[in-house]
């Protein structure tokens, strides 16, 4: 499976300006990462917490599941989105979200499909 995940993330990198990506289980366990200079296991756990907290907050206001969660820093953004019922995609980028959203959405779908075949 690692080769499938690697291909999915490499394809994403060829379509969107991202610095790194993680595929993470919904409970925060790292499935795959190509991130450098980051403790990937910690990043994965925090990304899952970020997305699940956003989901609970959106549920409180009766808005359903968030499409995307963005944490904007001084120079970079962390973007997390669901990738089916069992996983999420988390990336680091300097891009505007509008520039990469379509590629992220397609990648999340590919991750969901790959996990379904597992």
Image (tube, grey):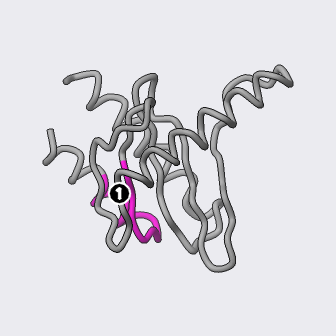
Q: Is residue 58 left or right of residue 50?
A: right
In reply to whether residue 72 is colored magenta, the answer given is no
* Residue 105 pos. (x, y %): 51, 44
The image quadrant where one finds the C terminus is top left
* Residue 82 pos. (x, y %): 51, 35
* SS class, disc 1: helix
Q: Is residue 118 left or right of residue 19?
A: left
Q: Residue at x 66, y 54 (%)?
A: 70
Q: Is residue 2 left or right of residue 60?
A: left
Which residues lie in the magenta part?
9-22
Q: Residue at x 52, y 47 (%)?
A: 47
Q: Quadrant of residue 16?
A: bottom left
Q: Residue at x 45, y 34 (%)?
A: 83
Relative to 64, residue 49 above or below:
below
Reading the image, the residue beneath label 1 is 40
The image quadrant where one finds the N terminus is top left
* Residue 49 pos. (x, y %): 56, 39
């Amino acid at each position: 499976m690692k080769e499938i995940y690697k291909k999915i993330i490499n394809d994403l990198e060829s379509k969107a300006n991202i610095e790194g990506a993680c595929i993470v289980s919904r409970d925060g366990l790292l499935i795959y990462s190509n991130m450098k200079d980051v403790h990937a296991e910690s990043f994965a756990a925090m990304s899952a917490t970020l997305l699940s907290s956003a989901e609970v907050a959106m549920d409180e206001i009766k808005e359903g599941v968030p499409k995307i969660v963005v944490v904007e820093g001084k120079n970079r953004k962390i973007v997390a989105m669901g990738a089916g019922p069992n996983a999420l995609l988390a990336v680091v980028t300097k891009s505007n979200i509008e520039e990469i959203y379509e590629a992220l959405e397609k990648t999340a779908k590919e991750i969901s499909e790959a996990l379904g075949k597992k």
